[in-house]
Image: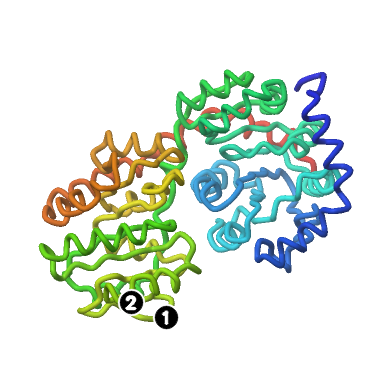
Amino acid sequence: MATKRSKLLSTYRKMTSIAEPLAARLLRQRLAQGKEDEDRLPERLGRPGRVRPKGPLVWIHAASVGESVSVLPLIRELGRLRPDAAVLVTTGTVTSGRLMVERLPPNAFHQFVPVDTPTAVCAFLDYWKPSLALWVESELWPNMLYETRERGIPVALVNARMSESSFRNWRRAKRAAAELLDSFDICLAQDDDVAAKLKALGAKHVEVPGNLKLVGDPLPYDAEVLAALRSATGSRPKWLLASTHEGEEQLAAFTHRDLSAQFPRLLTIIVPRHPQRGAQIAASLEGLFRVAQRSKGELPTADTELYIADTLGELGVLYRLCPLAVMGGSFVPHGGQNPLEPARLGAAVLSGPHIDNFREIFRLLVAGGGAEVLTANDQLTERVRFLLDNDIETMQRGQAAAAVAGSKEPLVRTFEFLAPYLRALDANARA
């Protein structure tokens, strides 16, 4: 750890100390916006929501849904290797908190991460006394890192990633970046590009076990719901545009229009990234197309052209229903959406050109024959047409996607690098 603090981080610590009295007010404002869980709000100030288990405790921090889901296999493997150790998982979003409560294995439990003020962070660490801290992907909270290392707790950055924009920003504050990264005993990068960025910013011990997101679980699903949708849609040709952002629903509708002459029974399923937009999307398309809306309890009928699946937690059903999944957030400059979820379920994957957030994953899927990234939006109609018209090609791509997305190697190699820290858990146990 750096002996002399950078001016930027010293200023940050002073400002967060001064701002501490405002933390509760800010959390109340976020609560009013639906961004906090009222029953568990004290956890955000470092106050425990349950009793600490006795013995070694591994603390895993993941920012939100994607990061927390990616470490579920890691948490299960921790339970197998060290059944005596409890696993505390912290996240910062309401959705991720609910998901973790539902999906964490018996060896783990969830708490909301405290706000990054000295008092909240110290209260959190003083109560939970973790033996080992694993931070996931790209979360670098200065007070949390500082106080964790001050207590002599080993810290690893797991499945580390860093976008080009983040790298450019950190290079402007290279001394602060080096100080933060020096807090980690080891940084485990998703790929060589991330490893190079971490080293350029001052990280000392960097290894590349691979991307843990390749090891994730298939999305859960409700078998009765899937059966009802299969009964309603039968053998109709269908494709899915998943996690759409504003403007992409119209692209899906125009694609459907262009394909409907060749595929008169075609069903296009649109899953908005934010389900609350469902009514607005349906209203904009009704009159031009025959639309059904899932949040109203509607199933597609034989006449339905566009099905707006504006509900939460049903992508596991929809990816199993459709052999062809097109990733939203990629036809507008958003950065794309995670293609591994449909890939694990054997769907062929198409994406638009904006994939900055998942570039390495797409590279692996494309190399494995399971995905195709379009270079322009106007290619969508022709590529969907090709796959709808070639069932065997679509099936083979889906099988190839599933093979890439089912890799276990990143998990195995991650634990090779974490082994010394797991062996030392007993020595580091604080309760």
For the C terminus, the image quarter is top right
- The amino acid marked with disc number 2 is Ala
Query: How much space separates mark 1 and mark 2, taking CA atoms?
Result: 8 Å
| Residue at x 29%, y 42% (from the top left corner) | 376
Above-or-below relation of 98 to 356: below
Q: Is residue 381 left or right of residue 274?
A: left
Q: Residue at x 24, y 43 (%)?
A: 400
Residue at x 77% of width, y 31% of height? 149
- For mark 2, give the secondary structure: strand
Residue 304: x and y in percent read: 25, 76
For the N terminus, which image quadrant? top right
Amino acid found under the numbered disc labelled 1? Lys
Question: In the rendered view, would you say 413 is above or below 139?
Answer: above
Do labels 1 and 2 touch, CB within 8 Å? yes
Quarter of the view holding residue 235: bottom left
- Residue bearing mark 1: 296
Percent x, y of residue 283: 40, 74
Of residues 239 and 147, the one drawn nearer to the viewer in this rendering: 239
Whether 232 is drawn above or below 390: the answer is: below
Q: Is residue 163 left or right of residue 135?
A: left
Number of residues whose C-alpha sits closer than 10 Å to that of mark 2, classed few (under 14), some (14–19) or many (20 or more): many
The quarter of the displayed image where residue 169 is located? top right
Q: Position of residue 206 (x, y in %)?
A: 56, 22
Measured along the vertical axis of the image, is residue 343 above or below residue 30? above
Q: Residues within 10 Å of mark 1 (few under 14, many from 20)?
A: few
The residue beneath circle 2 is 292
Q: Is residue 402 visible?
A: no
Residue 102 point in image, percent of width and height:
55, 63
User: In the structure shown, which secondary structural element does the residue marked by tag 1 occupy?
Assistant: helix
Q: How many marks?
A: 2
- Determine if residue 160 is in view: yes
The residue positioned 55% from the left and 41% from the top of the image is 81
